[in-house]
Amino acid sequence: MIIAGGYNIYPREVEEVLYEVPGVAEAAVAGIPDEYRGETVCAFVVRKKGASLTEDEAIKFCRQEMVPYKVPRKVKFMDELPKTTVGKILRRKLAEQAMSPEEDLQT
């Protein structure tokens, strides 16, 4: 669970909306530190082959589909999401990558 500005945000709810965005093959959400809100929502997205989805397009779609405090503040694009051997997405690893200095997350 992500607690942003006193609101409880369940990653699954945000991910379900992200999967509706045209051009999204996979999506995961993690909380990252935010000075004002405590935590904020960061989305990690794998684009479908040939898709040209931008961060602004993904955020705009989310703004139309959910309440403002759940909308991701950042969208990071990746080639693939880190997973366990059984295929579960490693959210903790994504959050660690998001907190590291701005680096290219393409794997």
Image: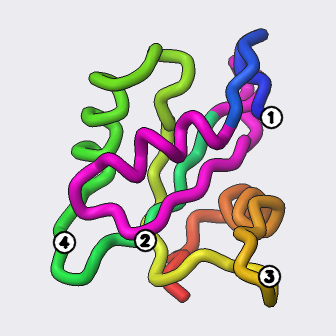
The numbered mark, 4 or 3, whose residue comes first in the sequence reads 4
Residue 46 tag number: 2
Three-letter code for the amino acid on which mark 2 is drawn:
Val
Three-letter code for the amino acid on which mark 1 is drawn:
Met
Dot 1 corresponds to which residue? 1
The numbered mark, 1 or 4, whose residue comes first in the sequence reads 1
The foreground one among 66 and 95 is 66
- The CA distance from mark 4 to mark 2 is 10 Å
Mark 4 surroundings: few (<14), some (14-19) or many (≥20) residues within 10 A: few
Which residues are the magenta region? 11-40
Q: Is residue 55 left or right of residue 81?
A: left
Q: Is residue 42 above or below residue 71?
A: below
- Measured as percent of width and height from the top left, residue 40 is found at 65, 32
Dot 4 corresponds to which residue? 51
The foreground one among 84 and 71 is 84
Which element carries disc 3, helix, strand or loop? loop
Three-letter code for the amino acid on which mark 4 is drawn:
Ala
Q: Is residue 12 left or right of residue 73?
A: right
16 drawn magenta: yes
